[in-house]
Amino acid sequence: MKPVLNPGRHIPSDNPDLVKKFILDLEENRRKLQGEDLIGFLEVFAGGEGNYCDLNKIRLAYATGDEQLLDLLNDYISRVDFNKTFDFYGDVIYYLIVAKQPLADFLVWIKESNINIYMGYLAKNYPDIPAKVKEYLRAMPEENTFSLHRAKKIFCDFVLQNDGEISRVESLEIFDKYIQSGVRYIHLVYN
């Protein structure tokens, strides 16, 4: 796939509704691509300016195993308001989970309803996400912080609702962690 346009210059940026439709159409088509076609798409749409192009730079770094992935992710999450982005920006959360990067202090700035939208996107697009989240939960520190308990509560809820292969014992363990984190979270909120 050869670049036929520079999306940074050709996305009709003076009309927000047209930009939104264009990006949503791009995403619909991106989801159908695999292998070299996907890499080609990402190369084309990582070549411009703006949040969407930067997201594609991150996707490309992930897809190609680029060592700069974590730097790109950290820069991106420091600049982008995840309360105002589309569901597919949840890819950033997936990459952070896979890389076992701390998420609690990042997620604290995102409304829980938006986090749930991102997690719903991940559940639809990444069959391995329940297992990745369980693994991530096991590795989370036991510190007593607001952001950490909130993240644990959200992730436990996600696993309980989306993991069709969870054992009864594991389900009870995660439910217990969900209750503990929820109670601690509420305690910290009201103190």
Image (cartoon, rainbow, N blue to C red):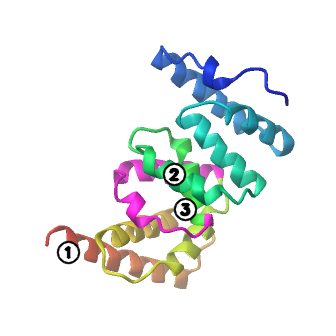
The answer to which of 54 and 91 lies nearer the viewer is 54
The x, y position of residue 94, in whole percent, is 58, 57
- The kind of residue tagged 1 is His
Say if residue 164 shows up in the picture.
no
* 174 w.r.t. 123: above or below: below
Q: What stretch is highlighted in magenta?
A: 98-125
Q: Which residue matches tag 1?
A: 187
> What numbered label is drawn on residue 75?
2
Closer to the chain start, of discs 3 and 1, is 3
- The structure residue drawn at horizontal position 54% and vertical position 62%, both measured from the top left corner, is 162
Q: In this view, does 164 lie to the left or right of 34?
A: left
Look at 68% across and 33% down and name the residue there. Answer: 47
Question: Residue at 38% of width from left, 64% of height from top?
Answer: 105
Amino acid identity at mark 3 = Asn
Mark 1 or mark 2, whichever is nearer to me: 2
**Mark toward the viewer: 3 or 1:** 1
Q: How far apart are marks 3 and 2 (CA)?
A: 30 Å
Within-10-Å neighbours for mark 2: few <14, some 14–19, many 20+: few
The image quadrant where one finds the C terminus is bottom left
Q: Could you tell me residue 132's position as x and y percent?
A: 61, 68
Q: Does the magenta stretch include residue 181?
A: no
